[in-house]
Image (spheres, helix red, strand yellow):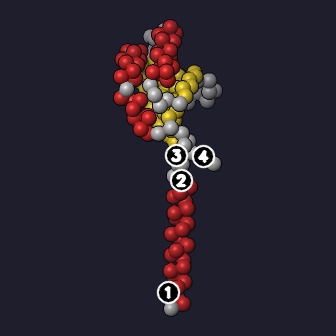
């Protein structure tokens, strides 16, 4: 009986430890970041990139659910950007807001603007982990 109790106790401890690790690895839903990184075609002018950025920035005003919009040009000295130069970060509160943004007609118009000047996009989304 003592052996059985010990094994049940040990199993309960192991289960609690596994659940604790899983909880630590799971993001707490707070803010959802939508990171978009562009590699523009080599033939694209600075004026064309400015036009794309203005159109991208304007989406915050026309699409509900975008909490913030940030952008910048790569300045890393590591030379690991693989030709990707411009980064844009949109923040949403929910996946539903992000999903509505993706299919929104204004976003689709933006896609039509950027496609002709884009060599390659890179997009990742992640939940900001809260401490």
**120 in relation to 41, above or below:** below
Residue bearing mark 3: 29
Earlier-in-chain disc, 3 versus 1: 1
Q: Position of residue 38 (x, y in %)?
A: 47, 23
Earlier-in-chain disc, 2 versus 1: 1
Give the Cα separation between the discs numbered 4 and 1.
40 Å
Earlier-in-chain disc, 2 versus 4: 2
Residue bearing mark 1: 4
Q: Position of residue 92 (x, y in %)?
A: 50, 34
Residue bearing mark 2: 25
Say few, some or many: other residues with alpha carbon within 10 Å of mark 4 (under 14 / 14 to 19 / 20 or more): few
Looking at the image, is mark 2 or mark 3 nearer the viewer? 3
The residue positioned 53% from the left and 57% from the top of the image is: 23
Q: Nearer the viewer, residue 123 or 26?
A: 26
**102 in relation to 118, above or below:** below
Q: Position of residue 127 (x, y in %)?
A: 52, 42
Give the Cα separation between the discs numbered 3 and 4.
8 Å
Q: Position of residue 55 (x, y in %)?
A: 46, 16
Give the Cα separation between the discs numbered 3 and 1.
40 Å
Earlier-in-chain disc, 4 versus 1: 1
Residue 39 appearing in the image:
no
């Amino acid at each position: 009986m003592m052996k059985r109790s010990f094994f049940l106790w040990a199993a309960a401890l192991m289960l609690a430890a596994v659940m604790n690790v899983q909880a630590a690895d799971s993001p707490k839903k707070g803010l959802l970041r939508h990171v978009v990184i562009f590699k523009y075609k080599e033939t694209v002018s600075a004026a064309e990139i400015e036009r794309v950025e203005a159109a991208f920035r304007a989406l915050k005003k026309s699409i509900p659910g975008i909490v913030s919009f940030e952008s910048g040009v790569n300045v890393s000295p590591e030379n690991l950007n693989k030709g990707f130069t411009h980064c844009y970060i949109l923040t949403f509160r929910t996946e539903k807001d992000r999903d509505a943004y993706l299919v929104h007609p204004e976003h689709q118009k933006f896609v039509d603007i950027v496609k002709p000047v884009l060599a390659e996009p890179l997009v990742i989304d992640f939940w900001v982990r809260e401490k």
